Image: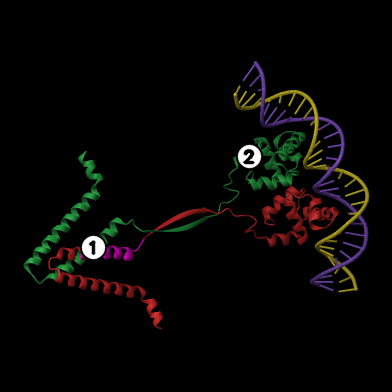
Chain colours: A red, B green, C purple, D yellow
Amino acid sequence: MISKLLAKNKTNLLYGALLGILLFLLNWLELRFVIFEHSFEIYAGAIAIIFTCLGIWLAMKLTKPRVETVIVEKHIYPDPAVDFVLNEKELASLGISKRELEVLQLMAQGLSNEEIGSRLFVSLNTIKTHSSKIFEKMDVQRRTQAIEKAKRLGLIP
Amino acid sequence: MISKLLAKNKTNLLYGALLGILLFLLNWLELRFVIFEHSFEIYAGAIAIIFTCLGIWLAMKLTKPRVETVIVEKHIYPDPAVDFVLNEKELASLGISKRELEVLQLMAQGLSNEEIGSRLFVSLNTIKTHSSKIFEKMDVQRRTQAIEKAKRLGLIP
DNA sequence: AATAAAATCACCCGAAAGTATGAGGGCTAA
DNA sequence: TTAGCCCTCATACTTTCGGGTGATTTTATT
């Protein structure tokens, strides 16, 4: 409870403490003044210095920093692979299966049928069958057309 | 000449003048003190207030304005097709000619060599030569690889 | 004018891609 | 369970692609 209150009024307490110290200093200086009658100028100077510092400190603490808003135009180059969303409707309407899509993706990466077969652990003939079906379903003649169309339709990144 | 000097030391002169005024004030207050023997506290308080203000003023004037920079990122999503900029450096470093780039673009659109030849009014053999050179320069084996790499390098949209 | 680079075309050959057809096994929804 | 789709694989055939070589013409570039 008390610690909470302390934490909340931390700054206020700090200010209070500082004021106290200042008053004490003032008093002490006055005492000195009483002892050395003619050290008035020193006293005044001390007060001046101390309160100048106080003023500076106050200004530093109390002035709000000027907020300068800098608008930076950040060009976002959408990494086609990162925020790619598969157009499942198109996929369904074309009737392309999961496996066929896989083949299509590898095709678009520039792999040969042979390489795709190795990648998917199936024979070249299987990939040929898949690609034929893909071309048929997508109504294209060549793999390059399939790739172009697939990208356009959002089937591949 | 003199006006220039004035302009240059404007702030310095201002400070000097202010100091002068302060000294005068101090003197005047001292005079008052002499007149009213027991108004010491008033005197000290006045000094305190004045120098606090001076400190504040000094801090405001002398410290660089504290600028808190808030960076607001404005995200811009460029349409890849609309504001496509050809990566001419890459094009030059690969040594790909204008004609070859044309062929590459048509390739990426899914055209066969035959079709590209018809489109550009040259023979199939010419397109074959072009594509061979393209693959050689791009260090790829297949047209699909060339397309993929060309897109990646910003040679085609 | 000389040189270099680009563009054009041709021929051959092998590799890859694409077409057609058939067939077997697996999964699922009617 | 049966019809339908998917996945797999095979064979045979055609087309397209890609590599290699060589040659001519046009177009810069110096």
Q: Gap between marks 2 and 1, in whole Å? A: 70 Å
Q: Is residue B152 above or below residue B39?
A: above
On whether disc 2 and disc 1 are found on a single subunit, the reply is no
Q: Are marks 2 and 1 in contact (CB under 8 Å)?
A: no
Q: Is residue B126 magenta?
A: no
The residue located at (69%, 62%) in the rendering is A89
Mark 1 neighbour class, 10 Å CA radius: few under 14, some 14 to 19, many 20 or more? some
- As rendered, which of B144 and C14 lies closer to the eye? C14
**Residue under pointer 2:** B91
Q: Whole-percent x and y of residue B152? A: 65, 48
Q: Whole-percent x and y of residue B88? A: 60, 40
Q: Whole-percent x and y of residue B77? A: 55, 54
Q: Chain of mark 2?
A: B
Specify the principal SS of the magenta part: helix
Q: Is residue A116 visible?
A: yes
Residue farthest bottom in this picture: A1
Side of A107 relative to C20 (left or right): left
Q: Chain of mark 1?
A: A
- Amino acid beneath label 2: Leu
- As rendered, which of B113 and A66 lies closer to the eye? A66
- As rendered, which of C20 and C14 lies closer to the eye? C14
Q: How many marks?
A: 2
The residue segment tinted magenta is A47-65
Q: Is residue A119 above or below residue B89?
A: below
**Residue under pointer 1:** A49
